[in-house]
Amino acid sequence: MPLTEDLSVFFNEFAVTVTKGAVTDKGILDMPTTIMGGEMVLSNEYTVMLRTSVFGVPLYGDAITVDGTAYTVREARMIDDGKLVEVSLAKV
């Protein structure tokens, strides 16, 4: 018996508003800080997790707004069974 899950429950709890073109839905923003340059420089790596069924797989250079902040897509990777896509972002 195939496992079916309701991803909207996950996104209702932790998500922010994401807009790409005419599509607006929820996504989960992650901003971990990375230590670089011999522990002298701190840098944030911006990623957002989206539902593939809503946003598809964004392409390099696509404009995307996450929680009111403008970004461009650097890279997109489907996760596990492809129902989610993790998108690396660059602030505009």
Image: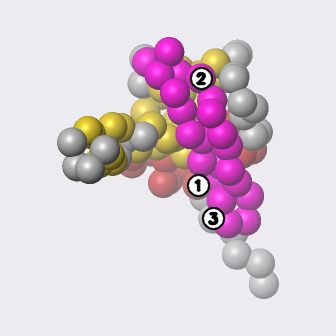
- Of badges 3 and 2, nearer the viewer stands 2
Q: Is residue 39 left or right of residue 18?
A: left
Q: Position of residue 2 (x, y in %)?
A: 77, 78
Q: Position of residue 37 (x, y in %)?
A: 31, 44
Q: Residues within 10 Å of mark 3 (few under 14, many from 20)?
A: few
> Residue beneath label 2, please?
72
Residue at the far left: name it: 40
Q: CA distance from mark 3 to mark 1?
A: 6 Å
Residue displayed at 26% across by 50% down: 38
Q: Amino acid type of disc 2? A: Thr
Nearer to us in this view, 9 or 88: 88
Q: Is residue 83 visible?
A: no
Kindly check if marks 3 and 2 are in contact, taking CB atoms under 8 A apart as contact.
no
Q: Residues within 10 Å of mark 2 (few under 14, many from 20)?
A: many
Which element is circle 1 on?
helix
Residue displayed at 26% across by 38% down: 41
Image height check: is 48 above or below 62? below
Q: Quadrant of residue 31?
A: top left
Q: Position of residue 32 (x, y in %)?
A: 34, 46
Kindly check if marks 3 and 1 are in contact, taking CB atoms under 8 A apart as contact.
yes
Q: Magenta residues?
A: 69-92
> Residue beneath label 1, please?
7
Q: Amino acid type of disc 3? A: Glu
